[in-house]
Image: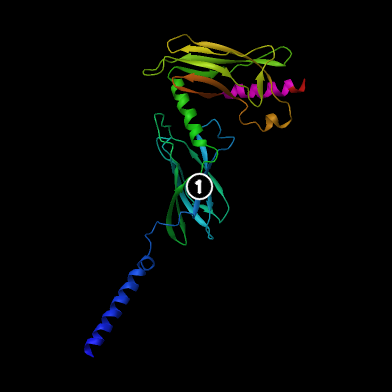
Amino acid sequence: MASLHRRRAAVCLVLMSATALAGCGTAVPEPAGSTPAAAVSVALNQSRDQYGTQAILLELTNSTTEELSVTGARVESPLFQGSISWTSANTPLALPPGQPKALPAVLPGPACGDVDTATPVATVHYSVNGQDREVAADAHDPFGILARTSGELCLAAEAAGVAALSLDPGLEPAADGRTAVVRLLVTPTGLEGSQKSLTIESIDGTTLLAEAVEGAWPRNVTIEAGGDATELRLPMRAARCDPHAVAEDKVGTLLPVRIAVGERRGILKVAAPTGLRGSLYDFVAKACSG
């Protein structure tokens, strides 16, 4: 009989041990700072104001049922040399459930060698109910902003080693006000280790400016790194005259220059200096009212 009691006690002990082991995953609290990956999602975007600049938007969406207090967010991508980050200056960002909010972030320098194009990873720091949390998940880039911007920055860096491209601040309007000439200045730099030349294949119009009918823009112009400065004259006309064209313009004075340098080929956006921007807006307004 005593032997039977001992066997029963042993069985009960084994069952108790198995139950305890089965419950280990829920009995022990998860480490502070961990959270389900779906708590906050991050998508990448870019406003019209940021287009042509080294900046993007980190769009955060709270997938929980409670308001979160976000203190920081960063995205890591092999296309860039450092983190793409946003940090709250003083007060954390209130992120209500299901209401996306966009945070501006400055892009670091691009990684221009043979880089991996792996999916970028986002990390968000926040607190909920007084507890600090962290979530890490893939960042969604539906418009390919990181690849495009990194490519543009690498193209610009390689081109800058050969020559600097800029727009002369002066505008030359025609007597009738229907056309005007913008001058693209090309100044060779010949930096050590750079390419020997670049080619300006063509120049595109913008939402505001187009090639004048009787003034073809230059094509396939080769610039030598050790050559002389060059001035390319671009006769222009107003590309559109609808009333909101100038009022809502964000990129109409960024001149798209198609270039080839080394193994790279793409568009280099040359921004009009402040004085020229104002002159171009005045030109379009007058040309459209004539």
Q: Is residue 63 left or right of residue 77?
A: right
Which residue is at 47% across, 32% downward? 150
Q: Position of residue 27 (x, y in %)?
A: 37, 68
Q: Position of residue 152 (x, y in %)?
A: 49, 28
Q: Would residue 272 be visible to someone looking at this image?
A: no
Let me know if residue 18 is in the magenta part: no
Instruction: Point out the stretch of residues depicted in magenta.
Output: 271-287
**SS of the residue under disc 1:** strand
Residues 163 and 177: in front is 163
Residues 150 and 286: in front is 150
The picture quadrant where one finds residue 241 is top right
Which residue ends up furthest to the bottom in the rendered image? 1
The chosen color scheme is: rainbow
Which residue is at 49% across, 36% downward? 146
The amino acid at mark 1 is Val
Provide the residue designation for mark 1: 42
Residues 234 and 285: in front is 234
